Image (spheres, rainbow, N blue to C red):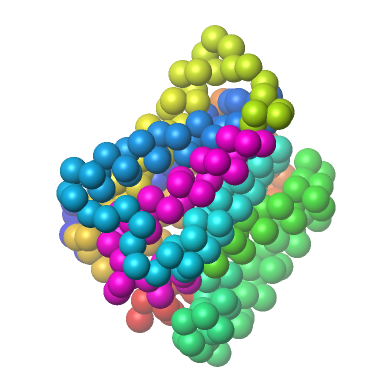
Amino acid sequence: MHDRSVHYMLIAGLLFACMNICVKLVSHLPTMEVVFFRSVLGLILTYALLKRKQIPLFGNNKVLLSLRGVAGCLGLVGSFYTLQHIPLASAVTINYLSPFFTAVLGIFIARQPLRPQQYLYFIMAIAGVALLKGFDTSISTFDLLIGLSAALFAGIAYNIISKLKTSEHPLVIIFYFPMITFPVAGIYSYFHWVNPTGLDWVILLLVGIFTQGAQYYMTRSYQQANLGRVASLNYLGVIYAILFGYLVFGEQLGLYALLGIVLILVAVVLNLRVRAS
């Protein structure tokens, strides 16, 4: 593995962790409002890049691109909601279940069959979720379902991206995400607006900056090394979440919740290695 690709992925993981902290710091604001601010920055930056590179904005397969945008929007809303409402480490771990949904949906969307050992990893992940939910009283069934739905929609988005990668420029695929999220979150926020005060404005700006920076370094890492090898480093984000959850928010996880997190992470990483081999 190229040393530089490792460094890039570690930086990306840290920046994503900082984004997660910022989202949780504005838990007093509606989730859709945080999503709105996140999508504004993403829309402006992506639009500027497309114009500078003189790439047509709306691509070729507008139906699939729009579906990718809708799935990405729903996944982002669910992810941010989970971050705001349950302990940081638990929220991040649940969000990381998206590769499982990507693999299962890939059977039908991308026609990619599962290998036998992947079924075992799915059972491990389900057992981990059961441990996490069963012994962490701060996670309601509703919040868990929102988190799992976010991972499901992320899996749908990844499968659509896989089908679009040969016909669309990556920036066009990215552009549809904030282009659809912006009006949806904007209309909701208009009717449910809670005015940010003081540091809220800085934190909301940082959500966008940290996300863009993390995506940049993650992309650089994937460009310089084997996808399967560096992808597992992305899951160090859970370690960051446990540390920051304790240091910043005073969150303490019980033994069974920690075991659930470990079980989910092991299952996800093993599943990634199967897909990459």
Camera-side residue: 11 or 194?
Answer: 194
Q: Which residues are magenta?
A: 159-188
The answer to whether 19 is drawn above or below residue 268 in the figure is above
- Give the main secondary structure, helix, strand or loop, of the magenta stretch: helix
Q: Residue at position x 43%, y 79% from top?
A: 274
Name the spot of residue 234 as percent of width and height, x first.
41, 54
The answer to whether 33 is drawn above or below residue 60 in the figure is above
The quarter of the image holding the N terminus is bottom left
The quarter of the image holding the C terminus is bottom left
Q: Where is residue 276, by image quadrant?
A: bottom left
Judge left or right: residue 240 versus residue 263.
left
Name the spot of residue 60 as percent of width and height, x first.
34, 67
Q: Is residue 163 magenta?
A: yes
Q: Residue at position x 61%, y 81% from top?
A: 120
Q: Residue at position x 40%, y 40% from top?
A: 42
How many numbered discs?
0
Name the spot of residue 118 as percent of width and height, x first.
55, 81
| Res. 159 visible in picture | yes
Camera-side residue: 42 or 124?
Answer: 42
The answer to whether 118 is drawn above or below residue 19 in the figure is below
Q: Residue at position x 72%, y 45% from top?
A: 254
Judge left or right: residue 149 versus residue 104.
right
